[in-house]
Image (cartoon, grey):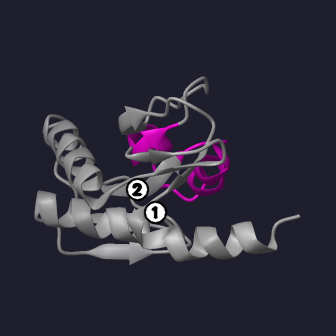
């Protein structure tokens, strides 16, 4: 992460590309076939597209009610575990889920399904290149 202050850490596109390569290598090492990538529209959409390109997967499912266990679930960060808790009940075979994130918040208990590229060094908010305007807006209106 190139720019850091007490509130946030900004991630560059260059770092995102390196992290995506790490994730693609980790997923490829599983030697499993995946039919699709599944994600949520906030946070996971851009990483899902990038991972799909790395792995040659053509189908990306966004905000599904049901998730196939042969689909890779992609998010930007594993933080509180709230997203994982929300989606795990939607998976047909939860033990087979592969849950992929760019970052995992240091000091958290991770589910066995989690694959991440890097642990965070701090508790700062991570600002990705695709959400810098959202972060600016949130910061402006926060109390």
Please name which of the two marks, 2 or 1, marks the residue nearer to the observer: 2
Is 48 in front, or is 89? 48
Is 133 in front, or is 120? 133
Residue at the location (13% across, 59% down)? 54
Is 133 in front, or is 33? 133
Q: Position of residue 102 (x, y in %)?
A: 38, 47
Q: Position of residue 139 (x, y in %)?
A: 71, 66
On whether residue 86 falls in the magenta region, the answer is yes
Q: Position of residue 105 (x, y in %)?
A: 55, 35
| Residue marked by disc 2 | 73
Q: On residue 67, which mark appears?
A: 1
Is 98 in front, or is 51? 51
Whole-angstrom CA distance, mark 2 to mark 1, is: 8 Å
First in sequence: mark 2 or mark 1?
1
Residue 37 in view:
no
Residue at the location (25% across, 75% down)? 59
Location of the N terminus by quadrant is top left
Up/down of 107 relative to 8, above or below: above
Label 1 neighbour load within 10 Å: few <14, some 14-19, many 20+: many
Residue at the location (40% across, 56% down)? 73
Label pair 2/1, CB-CB below 8 angstroms:
yes
What SS does tag 2 mark? strand
Q: Is residue 35 left or right of residue 82?
A: left
The region drawn magenta spans 78-104
């Amino acid at each position: 992460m190139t720019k850091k202050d007490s509130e946030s850490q900004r991630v560059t596109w260059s770092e995102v590309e390196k992290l995506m390569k790490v994730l693609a290598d980790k997923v490829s090492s599983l030697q499993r076939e995946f039919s699709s990538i599944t994600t949520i529209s906030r946070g996971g959409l851009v990483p899902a597209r990038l991972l799909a390109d790395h792995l040659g997967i053509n189908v990306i499912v966004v905000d599904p009610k049901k998730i196939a266990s042969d689909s890779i679930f992609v998010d930007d960060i594993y933080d509180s575990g709230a997203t994982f808790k929300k989606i795990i009940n939607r998976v047909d075979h939860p033990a087979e889920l592969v849950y992929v994130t760019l970052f995992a918040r240091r000091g958290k208990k991770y589910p066995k399904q989690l694959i991440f590229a890097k642990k965070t060094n701090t508790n700062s908010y991570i600002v990705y290149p695709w959400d810098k305007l959202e972060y600016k807006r949130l910061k402006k209106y926060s109390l």
